[in-house]
């Protein structure tokens, strides 16, 4: 089965997020949340820390089932950006920079397997517990300040990552 979407990861943060332009964002809702022990571990934050959680999904622009269920966590002072994303064309991380007042300078990504949780299974139209890809992305500003985290669940048959590394030529001599 060929994946619906592919994502090639290049050397820049802009390359990392370029696929967003080829998808349509669906805003599903938001809530303020205090990180419990489990969520604090996923977000790499302190227990009890407050976040604004945005529940979203991305779909191919040409239509079809969702590619990913995304739970995006931003600092509470970004409240208000929900209105800007409801049209589905927004670039979330540009909004994080605008509403948060700080540029994203680094992204860290952790990829692993997951049994698709019930809430993601409903969004993705698949059976709970099915195999999926779980991608955590951490977006950092100055002095490695955590600005945003996204927890992404991908069905295995709708998405693939492609990464390449170029080895440096040895120095002559």
Image (cartoon, grey):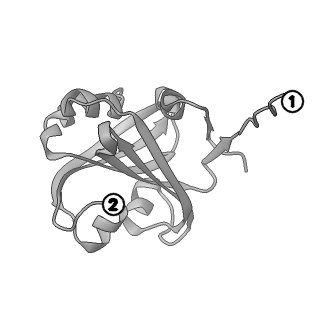
User: What residue did someone put label 2 on?
Assistant: 44
Q: Is residue 55 above or below residue 91?
A: below
Q: Secondary structure at mark 1?
A: loop
Q: Secondary structure at mark 2?
A: loop
Say which of 151 and 59 sits in front: 151
- In the rendered image, the quadrant that contains the C terminus is top right
Give left or right: position of 25 versus 68.
Answer: left
Residue 98, percent from left and from top: 23, 26
The disc label shown at residue 173, or none? 1
Q: Is residue 69 above or below residue 15?
A: below
At x 61%, y 56%, the residue is: 156
Q: Residue furthest front?
A: 173
Residue 72, percent from left and from top: 32, 48
Q: Which mark's residue is nearer the viewer, 1 or 2? A: 1
Say which of 123 and 146 sits in front: 146
Instruction: Give the alpha-carbon distance from disc 1 to disc 2, as whole Å.
Output: 45 Å
Residue 62, percent from left and from top: 53, 29
């Amino acid at each position: 089965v060929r994946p619906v979407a592919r994502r090639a990861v290049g050397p820049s943060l802009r390359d990392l997020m370029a696929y967003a332009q080829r998808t349509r964002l669906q805003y599903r809702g938001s809530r303020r949340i205090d990180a419990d022990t489990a969520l604090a571990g996923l977000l790499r934050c302190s227990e009890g820390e407050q976040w604004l959680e945005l529940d979203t999904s991305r779909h191919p622009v040409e239509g079809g089932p969702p590619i990913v269920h995304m739970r995006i966590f931003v600092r509470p002072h970004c409240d208000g950006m929900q209105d800007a994303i409801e049209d589905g064309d927004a670039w979330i991380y540009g909004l994080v920079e605008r509403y948060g007042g700080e540029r994203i300078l680094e992204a860290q990504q952790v990829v692993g397997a997951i049994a698709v949780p019930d809430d993601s299974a409903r969004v993705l139209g698949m059976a709970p517990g099915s195999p999926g890809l779980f991608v955590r992305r951490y977006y950092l500003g100055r002095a490695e300040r955590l600005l945003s985290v996204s927890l992404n669940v991908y069905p295995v048959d709708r998405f693939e990552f492609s990464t390449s590394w170029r080895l440096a030529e040895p120095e002559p001599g």
